[in-house]
Each structure stands twice: as C-alpha cells, then as structure tokens.
Image: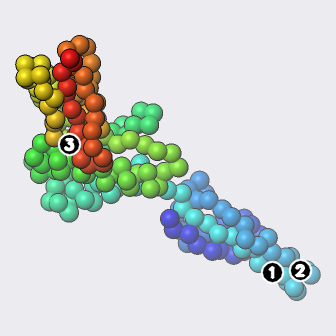
Amino acid sequence: MKEITATGQTVEEAVESALAQLQTTRDRIDIQIVDEGKKGIFRIFGSKPTVIKASLKVDPIEEAKNYLSNVCEKMGASVKVDVKKEGKWVQFELIGKNLGLLIGKRGQTLNSLQYLTQLVLNRYSDHYFNVLLDAEDYRKRRKQTLVQLAERLAQKAIKTGLAVELEPMPSHERKAIHTALVENKQVTTFSKGEDKQRHIVISPVK
C-alpha cells in the first residue's frame, strides 16, 4: 500500500497536495490527520501547517487480476482475464490462445496459479475469498472426468471390498467426487491427509 505525508494550511489543502502526489482522486485514498496545525496571528506568525497521511485504497480483486496477468505474461502467454464475483467466490477466466501451458498436466499448473492468486487476493482483502481459476472451460471438462473416475473407482471398491485412495486434489475437485457418489449407498467417501496431500478415499460399506 502506497502511503505519503502531505501538508497544507488546511486539511483541504493537505488533501489536494496528497492527491497531486499520488495522482489519484479523493474516493481512492484514505486520510489520517496527524496534526491539525495552527493558524497563528494573521495566519502568518506562529502558524503551523496541517499534516496528514494519505494512502491509496487497494482493490483486492484488481490486485489479484493484475498479478495473474503478469505471471501469465512471464510464462509466455498473453491473456485477457475476466472476473466474476458471487458471494465469497471469485472466478477468474483466462481467455487467449494456446492456454495448455497455463493448464498443465491434469490442471496442475492451473491449480498452482489458482492457489497463488487466492493468496494475493486475500492478502489485500479484509474478508476471506475462495478463488476459482479457469481456462478454455477446463473446469467443466475436468468435472466430467472426475465424475466418471468416481463412478469407476466406486465399482472397484464394491467389487474388491477394499478402500480406494485417489491422488491429492484441490478442495473443489474433492467436492466433485463427494457429490458424484453421495447417493451411492454402497460406498462412503472421506478426505484424508493434510494441505496439498489431502485426497479422497472411497470405501465400500460393509
């Protein structure tokens, strides 16, 4: 957050000085009065200037969007980033050509970018947000794959009578597995492991 100290004969003058230094508008800064100053005799003798601190307000979603754009550019992909906000969820959609580089194997690169973008957003925000990052409708295609995988491994667990452990997945993918099997009364699902090693276990009901 950029913060400066500005002075003036009045608070208004100090604010105008701050706006000029920050090259912004009044609605985009926070003001803290450090010293109200003193007018003095004839506003000259013994006068003391008003001192304020002015800091730029930061839009956490805009900061996250800029971060994402810069990282993608450094990775060699020129993208447009569309943003949709719904409650505590913020979705960033990458639009461009040859986005396979940003998706990676099984979406691993996309998941890493999503994790980092969420860290940046919540660093600047007073409220916690969940981030969903998508490119070329990958999330929808991945969800369909996960549903098919869940059904296939559920049948394996039922047939063998043994629990099946899946590879580590981010929370939204684990949720897709849970949801896909919630009505299957022959198996139960639960999460196991910590942080990036957290994964789904599909266990037959005995």
Disc 1 marks a residue whose amino acid type is Lys
Q: Which mark is residue 48?
A: 1
Q: CA distance from mark 1 to mark 3?
A: 63 Å
Query: Which numbered mark, 3 or 2, is in the foreground of this view?
Result: 3
Instruction: Specify the farthest residue to the front.
Output: 206
Q: Which mark is residue 40?
A: 2
Q: Are marks 2 and 1 in contact (CB under 8 Å)?
A: yes
Is 1 drawn above or below residue 69 in the view shown? below
Visual colour scheme: rainbow
Q: Position of residue 15 (x, y in %)?
A: 66, 66
| Along the viewing direction, whichever of 168 and 59 lies nearer the viewer | 168
The reply to whether residue 148 is visible in this rendering is no
Q: Residues within 10 Å of mark 1 (few under 14, many from 20)?
A: some
Disc 2 marks a residue whose amino acid type is Gly
Q: Which mark is residue 168?
A: 3
Q: Residues within 10 Å of mark 3 (few under 14, many from 20)?
A: some
